[in-house]
Image (tube, rainbow, N blue to C red):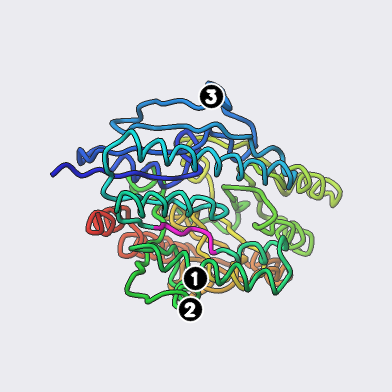
Amino acid sequence: MEKRVLIYTNHFYPEYFKINDVVDWLSTENITTSVVTSNPNYPKGKIFKGFSIFGSKKIHKTANVYRLPVIPRGGGNKLILSLNYLSYFFSLFLFTFWLIITHGKYHTLLIHHTSPPLLFLPALIYKKIKGADVILWDLDMWPQTLSSVGILESKGLINFLEDLFKWFYKQFDHILLGSESYKEIAQKRINLNKTLYFPNWADLVFESQNPIEKNYNPTKKAIISYAGNIGQAQGLESLVEAVKLSKSRNYQIRLIGDGRARESLKNLVLSEGLNNQIKFYDSVNSKSLLDLFEESDFLYLSLNDSPLFSKTVPAKFQTYLASGVPIIGLISGETNHLIKDNNLGFSCNAGEANALSKVFDSLSNIQNSQYQKMKFNCNELYQSRFSSSLRKKELFDLL
């Protein structure tokens, strides 16, 4: 019997999310796949060149890609962002009924959940009418995400949403969780037998390469690179504070990427007189990013201090590991423990700028033998726990 898979996701190629790899896996296995998504506008909030706000149907590899009309997310205005979410929801709601009426049954519906849970209801309608198995790939724990970034503070509303999510979770056949710590939240909602630890894997450009080979010279200026979204959740203001507090100037920070907090962060760096110490780079493709990582001695990651973020493993963590470059983290919880317990580099708790400044000051004391051990540990952990081949097998076992 022909296997048919339907995917609901806010984001898809040319936006880079791991769901792109999943669609490629399905295509190579000749599984009939349809992707229902919006027109690409992340992270800048503008529709990518070559796309429009209107709907379309195209082919990606062997998958049908249905792009629904949406209002672009804009530059950070909460009202516009809300309209973006709502426009996708209403488009998806109507499109789901069109699929039910005009298309044959999809055996599995995979929800790639990166934003508000507006994808849930149309998916459950499809499940109810067509009888498909529904898999939730939950990358953001709601409503905890809302309270973590200060959007939602009402305990009454948080409790209501938690009850709603408990009901939603019970409707799904399987739930994929991006970190071990998410199980603490999930077990309050459902039996953990329905869940699967399903962490991210590296960008495949990095996974297909051998780990970067380099020696560490403590007398030379160390290059510390951050790559990814520059938003409020990343807490990069603490990085600026740490550089300000640091006594050493024998290192340079490179911030590679874009996001809603980039301009305000650039202004902060300029106002502190650190523009020679902290450099900004535009977003680049994976090959160019690999080149920048080859120039780097350490890779940096951080998240704000919050109970939810302490349970989160940022997606860039796996790409950092696969590159074989040691990590400096300003992050609490699970990721902090992964870095420390496996000797992958250095890590301080989220927001502890003073502790991070001391790490920067200590870089001139690191010996190459110590550096090589951290490099080896990064690759070893990636291969044993995070490689894409592990995730592909687990996903296909569910399908």
Which residue is rendered at x = 48% and y = 78% of the image? 188
Asked if the stretch drawn in magenta spans residue 241, the answer is no
Q: Nearer the viewer, residue 183 or 230?
A: 183
- First along the sequence among labels 3 and 2: 3
Gap between marks 1 and 3, in whole Å?
37 Å
SS state under label 1: helix
Q: Is residue 101 left or right of residue 68?
A: left
- First along the sequence among labels 1 and 3: 3
Q: Amino acid at mark 1?
A: Lys
Say if residue 209 shows up in the picture: no
Quarter-of-image position of residue 63? top left
Give the foreground label among 1 and 2: 1
- Residue under numbered circle 1: 166
- Asked whether disc 3 touches disc 2, contact meaning CB atoms under 8 Å apart, the reply is no
Q: Nearer the viewer, residue 106 or 270?
A: 106
Q: Amino acid at mark 2?
A: Lys
Give the foreground label among 1 and 3: 1
- First along the sequence among labels 1 and 2: 1
How many neighbours does mark 3 have within 10 angstroms: few (below 14), some (14-19), or many (20 or more)? few
Say if residue 325 shows up in the picture: yes
SS state under label 2: loop
- Asked whether disc 1 touches disc 2, contact meaning CB atoms under 8 Å apart, the reply is yes
Residue 188's disc number: 2
Quarter-of-image position of residue 43? top right
Which residue is rendered at x = 35% and y = 37% of the image? 101
Residue 51's disc number: 3
Gap between marks 1 and 2, in whole Å?
8 Å
Q: Amino acid at mark 3?
A: Phe
Asked if the stretch drawn in magenta spans residue 140, the answer is yes
> In the rendered structure, which segment of residues is drawn in magenta?
136-141
How many neighbours does mark 1 have within 10 angstroms: few (below 14), some (14-19), or many (20 or more)? some
